[in-house]
Structures are given as structure tokens and as C-alpha cells.
Image (cartoon, rainbow, N blue to C red):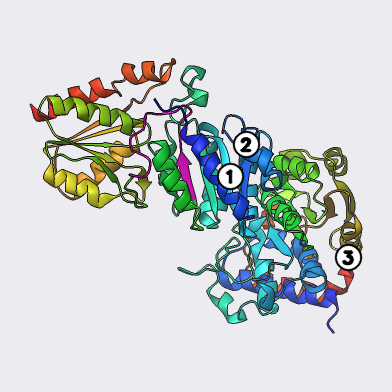
Amino acid sequence: MNNIANKAVICDVLLQAANKDKNIVVLCSDSRGSGSMTAFANSNPTQFIEVGIAEQNLVAISAGLASCGKKTYAVSPASFLSTRSMEQVKVDVAYSNTNVKLVGISGGISYGSLGATHHSVNDIAIMSSIANMRVYLPSDRFQTKELIEKLLQDKKPAYIRVGRNAVEDVYTDGKIDFTLDKATVVTEGNDIAIIACGEMVSTAKVAADQLQTQGIKARVLDMYCLKPLDRQAIQKAAEECKGIITIEEHSCYGGLGSLVCSVVAQTCFTKVKVLALPDEPIVSGKSPQIFAHYGLNSAGIMAAVKEILK
Amino acid sequence: MTKLWEKAAQIREDLVTLIYKSGGGHIGGDLSETDILVTLYYKYLHCSPSLVNDPNRDRFILSKGHSVETLYCILADLGYFPKSDLDNYSGFNSKYIGHPNNHVNGIEMNTGSLGHGLSLGVGMSLAGKMDKKDYRVYVVMGDGELAEGSVWEAAMAAAHYRLDNLTVFVDRNHLQISGDTEKVMSQDSLQERWGAFGWNTITINGNKIGEISRAIEIAQKNSENPTIIIANTTKGCGCPSIENKAEWHHKLPTLAEYKTLLAEIRAGGVSHE
């Protein structure tokens, strides 16, 4: 059982990189604790900036720093980062093309019992609709590490959403097949494709294992790259599998399911079943309870497979 | 050498002509900020076309981005790009658009949505401190813009980090698109407000180049905190026929009005010394 959250991995990667690169700067909005950035703040105080509870300022200050050559990582709860500061993201980061990486922590319904103020179930839709913004939802700690190490090498804006808690490993350390902006094939199969992102990849993998016992071979695609979307992998799945299931910790509007449907409808038509959060105030509770309520678990995937293959 | 008041008059002529010919622009705010921008660009800013990528250059942010015509005219006059480029101002697919665009040589960041520029300036000032560079950062905001909450987030941060390399002008012309700022959202007394936020505050006549110069020099010598220069200005300054009239926020002159504006500028430039 893994107990290292993806956000903690981001801190580790940045810590190591910052020791060699003094232009790496992490900014928090009173979120160093929740963002697992306390270690960074303590170890590299000259490369850490606290802006207080002010997300608009967080993003625009990051952009100002980036315009002077800094590689900035703005770390704040995804719920606030993706909506409170959306205009600064649109103008100061994406439009001005500054090297700001926006790290939305405790995304989706990580703060399940805190209510809709703290849920970020719109961030894929919001961020992916902004020109020049990339959107990533890594699945596990190994992929998160690979992703951040790659993003450290470029100068373009990006939004990275991770959850609050540790998630089950999808990959094995040292054996992850990672190419930036290419979906990772987690399991091979042509009976059904399950396309997932973020925390839901682990769930999809569990479902694939269960389907295997029933003689159904599922192709699980880890679509951590929501934008740019790996359209080729989606089209291939549409052509080679009998149907596609998408599963995401996001609203049914404008998320992974919407994006996949758009590609399928324009390339190779096949049945698609979208598993996502409904257009209603999300119930409160612990994450597994909420996922079960909306069928965002292996049981929900099994039911969707049965429906498609019937 | 051309005196600054003469340069300010020339820039006024240029921007009024640009607006008349292109059929777009924010003439009232352009004219109120002209003396501030001219004083900065021709006397104090450590920047030039050959220094646009120099990490030690001073940074300038026009946070009230709608008043971009003044800035474009100054940058063209200083050789950042050919003056003829502005023939396509506001034209189809032109990079010379109605708000500062960082695809234009000499423009640091895109602005236009109000309330962003001060935060950007805080980031640039922090970078200067981190890198132990002695460049300065200048931001010009409008007074109506101060209703944006993000301005005060940035005001807190600048004072918290004691950013003495940051100098901010408020183009206090008392008019915004809907009318008198005090009727839209009252904000007097600005000096007390900014002082309470921990800023070094200076109030001047922002259409007098001598006062602007002295204020900048006071800010440069201050090593305690960021400086805000509350520059009391006249909207439409230099053109009495449109001064202090809210409708001239972005009204376009007719040919007859344009000729009047040019005549007024030529007659009154010296008053800005």
C-alpha cells in the first residue's frame, strides 16, 4: 500500500531540482502545508514565496517572476487556483506566455466532506479551454515524478492537478513507460478500452484485472495529458476495441469524457460510456463513499462494460 | 536636446493623430498619463531598444492598458519599432492592438484587464531582489482600477516584502468610463489608504514634469518600502476642449475636433513643464 501522495512527490522533485537550479521558485497561498511544500519552504527559503490567502496575486506574481527568468510553481488548492485566479491564469500566464506551472492540489473531490466550495470538478474544462495552457492529471507517484521532471525542462505554462491522498501505484518504479503528451497503455486488450485520468487510473486498473477473470481483455489508457490530448491513442482505441469507457473525477461537462467523445465522433465512431460526476451539487463524504455513490469505481466500470458489450 | 515638455507635446500630437486615423483608442486617459510616461521613458527608465533583453533593464508595466496609444507612440519615437508599424494599429491581425501586447518590442507583459499590473510588478521586483539586481520596476495604474480587489492583494505583498525597487503611479484623473470616480466608487483619500498599507506615499500634480521627476527621485532614494506616487492629473490634459469630460474616455474625434485638439496641444505644451 503506497502512502506517498502525488503532491509530496512534486515537492521532492522540486526540492532536488532547486538545489541545482536557483531559478526554481515555489509560491504558496497559505497552502504550504496542504500542498506538502513545507519541506521545500524550510529547505529553500530564498526560493519560496508566501503570498497569503490571495490566489489572484499568487498567479500574477508568479507570472512577473517568470518574466524575469524564474521557473515558478504556484501551489494552491485546485478549487481556488482554477476559478478564483482564472483571469490571471488566462492573461498573465497563458496569454503572456510565462513559465508558470500551476499546481492544483487536493483536486476533484479530495476535500469530500468540505463541500462544493472546496471541490474542483471544473478544472479540466476551465483550464483546457484557455489557449496556450496545458493540462495534466498524473495518476500515481511514479508518473507524477516523470511528469514534473519533464515539465522542469520547458518554459511553457501548464496546469497540473493532483489529489490530496496517496493513491495505489499504477506503475512500478523504474518500469514506467512515459512520453510527454502520450497516453500510457496500462493494460493491453481489444475487447474494451477504459480511458482514465488522475486517481481514476488506479480504479480502472482494478476493474481491468476483474474483467480479465471474466475473459474480457480491457485496454486501460492513462490519459494524464488532457491537453494536449493524445488523440491518436483515442482513435486507435476506437478502431480496435468494441467500445470505450471514460472515467474521471470531474464534471460530466468539459472533462475527459467530453474530450474523448469529441475525438471519437470526428474520427472512428464507437460506443462511449462516460463515467463522471453529474451536473449537481456533489454529495459530501469521504472520497471512496462519493465515488461509490456516483459509480466512479470498479463496480461502475464493470456495469458500464456490461452495458456496452451486451 | 528636446525639452521634456516639448517631447510630451509631440507625443500628444502623435497619439491624437493615431487615434484619429485608426478610429480607436482611449484618448482621455492617454492624455492624462502622457507626462508621466514621457518623464519615465525619456529621463529615468534604464531601457532602450538595445536593452530589451538585458536582465538589468528597468521594467515598465502599463496596468491601465487601455491607454496604450501613448505607450506605442513613445516606443515608436524611441525606435523600438518603426513608426510606420502604427499605420496598422487596430488593423486586422495586427500586433498593435488596443492594449499592450508583449509581441510588440518593448512591451514586457500583456495588460488590459485591470488590476493585474501591480501583482506583475511585485513579481518582477521580487525577482530583482532574489537576483540582487538593481533594476527598478515602474507600474502605472488608473484610479478607477483601484476598485479591483487584486490591487490590494498586491499592495499588501509589496509592503510585506519591502519592495523599495517598486514605484507605482496612480493616474488620478478622477474620471472613469461612467463618470466621477467618487460617484462610481469613492476612494479619497488615497494617500492615507496606501500609507496604511505600508507604502511610501507622494502626492503630486501628475501633469507637471518637474513634480513627476522629483517624486521619482524621492522614490529612488527610499530604501524602506515601495513608493506610490498619487499623480493628480486632468483627463484629456493638453486639450482644453475635451478636458475633464467623461465622454472623452474613448470618444473618437471628428476631423474638425481633431484639428482643434492639435491646435490646443501646440498652443499649450509649455504648461506641463
Residue beneath disc 3: B213
Q: Nearer the viewer, mark 3 or mark 2?
A: 2
Q: Is residue B90 above or below residue B141?
A: below
* Distance in Å between CA atoms under marks 3 and 2: 46 Å
Q: Is residue B272 left or right of residue A15?
A: right
What count of labels does the image hold?
Answer: 3
Q: Report the amino acid beneath label 2.
A: Ala
Looking at the image, do the residues carrying marks 3 and 2 touch, with CB atoms under 8 Å apart?
Answer: no
Task: Name which residue lies at 65% across and 74% down.
Answer: B17
Q: Are marks 2 and 1 in contact (CB under 8 Å)?
A: yes
- What's the distance in space between the residues labelled 2 and 1, CA to CA? 8 Å
Q: Which residues are magenta?
A: A158-175
Task: Please tell me how crowded label 1 is: few (under 14), some (14-19), or many (20+) other residues with Cα within 10 Å.
Answer: many
Please say whether residue A88 is visible from this viewpoint: no
**Which sits earlier in the primary sequence, circle 2 or circle 1?**
1
Q: Secondary structure at mark 3?
A: helix
The residue under the point 60% across, 50% down is A18
Residue at (45% x, 38% y) in the render: A161
Q: Chain of mark 2?
A: A
Give coordinates of residue B210: x percent, y percent: 91, 67
Q: Is residue B189 visible?
A: yes
Label placed on residue B80: none
Q: Pointer 1: what residue?
A: A15
Q: Nearer the viewer, mark 3 or mark 1?
A: 1
Q: Amino acid at mark 3?
A: Ser
Residue with the mark numbered 2: A39
* Nearer to me, A253 or A233: A233
Q: CA distance from mark 3 to mark 1?
A: 45 Å
